[in-house]
Amino acid sequence: MSTATFYMPAVNVIGAGAVEQAVSELSQLGFKHALIVTDKPLVELGYAGDLQQALAKQDIQAHIFSDVQANPTTGNVEAGLALLRQHDCDFVISLGGGSPHDCAKGIALVASNGGDIRDYEGVDRSAKPQLPLVAINTTAGTASEVTRFCIITDEKTHIKMAIVDKNVTPIMSVNDPVLMKNMPKSLTAATGMDALTHAVEAYVSTAANPITDACALKAVTLISQYLTRAVSDGTDMEAREQMAYAQLLAGMAFNNASLGYVHAMAHQLGGFYDLPHGVCNAILLPHVQRFNSSVASARQTDIAAAMGLEVKGLSKEEGAKLCINAIVKLAEQVGIPVGLAGLGVKEADFDTLATNAMKDACGITNPIQPSHSDVVAMFKAAF
């Protein structure tokens, strides 16, 4: 038997009013100067300014770095790091979804360890903990606020680097559904399907364990029950709060069981074409799971049951098909595009995309290790 290590932030605040509680707690930790890492839409919505003012009331100064791109880049990390050093910040706050969180992780990691963010691609490459990071979430999907995963696009190679490092885990995660009510329908759908992908890939992962299994299956159930409601009516606060719990549970699952070839392939699409990560995951998910079915059908049947489907009396092969069809149906219900062709992906690039996907750390725990031709075939099936 092997040992299992469970990673997540020491403190996790969730529910309406979570931001206020978190800011109050920060004042007790002795921090004096924050770098808020966010994006321009959240500045325009006033979220960043509101946070800055709330921190000021606790005698914490804050400067805002809002140049984070949808797929954060090495340049974003370098620019944020320069601002952090300019103002001698002693901690970092990420405000947003996966993009600000990942960029903030990159900034905080290099701030403590030196060098370049490219130096840390792979698993546990850093020597010491990053600068303290507090992750305030505004979406229900990426779970980056609770994970040791950091995805940064190398501007030179256009490859998304997967940095999987215990030292990028935030010290506190904050999930306040009030901040999520203004998410557009398309973003709600994409991030929700991202969370489903996390749960499914973690459950069929070769590193799954009873703790990650419990988190993954509960996440699947909540997403199946509440995602369509959250997309249909963004002000449905019950749906928003339950999706916040769902994505956090999915994050707890994949942070410890890791992921699979959906993410390994989606990372390449995001880096190569600058496409939204959640949409790429949603399109690829059924195709990769069909590939996995020869060894993962029993677990896929469990997922179908967690989605509320009747599996009694079905063979594991029938259960797997039921699971995959349900994933396709949910994606259609929330408006996910049906294929990669509509996103501008080119079939001529599949060979290069497959080569890069096979180097991605997320693929290590996929239930089957595909050949290069297998990965190309999955890209074609999703086209």
Image: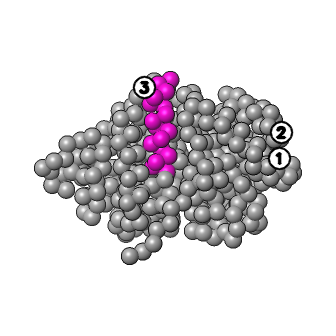
- Does 214 sit above or below residue 238? below
Q: Which residues are magenta?
A: 235-251
Q: Secondary structure at mark 3?
A: helix
| Whether residue 115 is situated above or below residue 20 in the rendered picture | below
Circle 1 crowding by C-alpha within 10 Å: few under 14, some 14–19, many from 20: some
- SS label for mark 1: loop
**Placement of 217 over or under 157, stated as above or below:** above
Disc 3 marks which residue? 232
Q: Position of residue 128 (x, y in %)?
A: 70, 68
**Is residue 2 in sight in this rendering?**
yes
**Of helix, strand and loop, which mostly describes the magenta segment?**
helix
Residue matched to label 2: 59
Q: Earlier in the sequence, mark 2 or mark 1?
A: 1
Pinpoint residue 18: horizontal percent, then vertical percent.
Answer: 61, 36
* Residue at point 67%, 28% (across, down): 45
Q: Residue furthest front?
A: 28
Residue 244 lies in the magenta stretch:
yes
Q: Which residue is tagged 1?
A: 32
Residue visible at 70% across and 60% down? Answer: 130
The amino acid on which the numbered mark 3 sits, given as a three-letter code, is Ser
**Distance between mark 3 and mark 1 Cα atoms:** 41 Å
Within-10-Å neighbours for mark 3: few <14, some 14–19, many 20+? some
